[in-house]
Image (cartoon, rainbow, N blue to C red):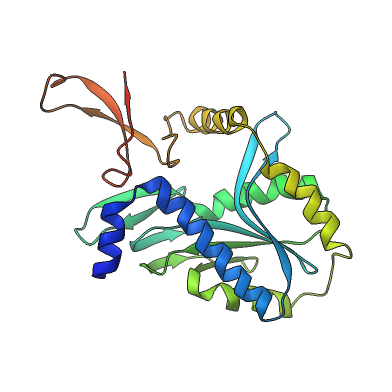
């Protein structure tokens, strides 16, 4: 589970928000290789799907193809990953044995797919792929559903190929479907802020506006604020966001 010197350097320089965006970009890069090898499609990132209650469901990466839409949930973690399909939370354990919980990405993507299906129609097949960084190890991950793939990023091409080769063409006009979804990537700041607020309300816990991880209640131990409580990002030290009470 030891990390390379390059990985350690990257972790020390960039915060969690950067890691999340970078992970999505790396997934997009893998999909460009998929296109290069003949399984062509259109790529979209950060798609805000409308829900019936006026809220939104944000999808990291979509790959719109003649087979249907590949729905990617990107997790750019390092360390050991533990989780099962039915559990509410999964765990990442760092090299120093420190553990962090995160919401089950299979459940998370299932919710994304529910609202995406309603938006594009029942005739468009949707495929769920959970992508983790190559820097992690899927130590014990139990997922048995045939319609869900949990992979490391370097297996993106193989995952898309396996689904592609086992499904008939289902989308006649990829470009029209792409344009219908593209408008959902161009949202203003208020929509993004409302999305974060909706997550906080749902889980009864504040969310970091920089990286999307949960904020945890902490107490200052030193300085002029010693003894005072505040919310700090659970992604610390990568993300140093603080919300004063």
Q: Nearer the viewer, residue 173 or 127?
A: 173
Left or right of 3? Residue 138 is right
Spot occupied by residue 95 in the image (x, y as percentages of width and height): 22, 62
- Identify the image quadrant of the N terminus: bottom left
The residue at the far right in this view is: 172
Q: Quadrant of residue 160?
A: bottom right
Q: Quadrant of residue 217?
A: top left
The residue at the far front in this view is: 13
Identify whether 8 is placed above or below 237. Answer: below
Q: Name the residue rendered at 61%, 69% in the picture.
A: 31
Spot occupied by residue 41 in the image (x, y as percentages of width and height): 73, 67
- Identify the image quadrant of the C terminus: top left
Q: Name the residue rendered at 80%, 51% in the picture.
A: 179
Spot occupied by residue 22 in the image (x, y as percentages of width and height): 46, 56
Q: Nearer the viewer, residue 238 or 119?
A: 238
Q: Is residue 243 visible?
A: yes
Marks counted in the figure total: 0
Spot occupied by residue 123 in the image (x, y as percentages of width and height): 85, 58
Q: Is residue 123 visible?
A: no
Left or right of 158? Residue 18 is left
Q: Name the residue rendered at 39%, 38% in the picture.
A: 214
């Amino acid at each position: 589970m030891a990390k390379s010197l390059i990985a350690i350097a990257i972790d020390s320089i960039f915060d969690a928000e950067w890691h999340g965006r970078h992970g999505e970009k790396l997934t997009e890069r893998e999909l460009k290789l998929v296109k290069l090898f003949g399984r062509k499609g259109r790529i979209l990132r950060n798609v805000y799907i409308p829900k019936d209650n006026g809220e939104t469901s944000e999808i990291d990466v979509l790959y719109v193809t003649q087979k249907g839409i590949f729905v990617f949930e990107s997790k750019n973690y390092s360390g050991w990953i533990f989780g099962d399909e039915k559990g509410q939370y999964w765990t990442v354990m760092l090299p120093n044995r420190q553990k962090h919980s995160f919401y089950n990405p299979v459940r998370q993507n299932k919710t994304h797919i529910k609202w995406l299906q309603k938006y594009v129609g029942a005739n468009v097949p949707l495929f769920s792929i959970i992508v983790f960084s190559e820097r992690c190890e899927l130590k014990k991950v139990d997922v048995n559903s045939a319609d869900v793939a949990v992979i490391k990023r370097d297996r993106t091409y193989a995952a898309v190929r396996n689904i592609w080769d086992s499904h008939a063409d289902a989308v006649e006009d990829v470009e029209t479907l792409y344009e219908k979804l593209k408008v959902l990537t161009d949202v203003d700041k208020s929509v993004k802020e409302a999305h974060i607020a909706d997550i906080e309300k749902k889980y009864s816990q504040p969310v970091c506006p920089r990286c999307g991880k949960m904020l945890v209640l902490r107490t200052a131990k030193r300085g002029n604020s010693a003894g005072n409580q505040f919310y700090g990002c659970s992604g610390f030290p990568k993300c140093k966001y603080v919300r004063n009470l």
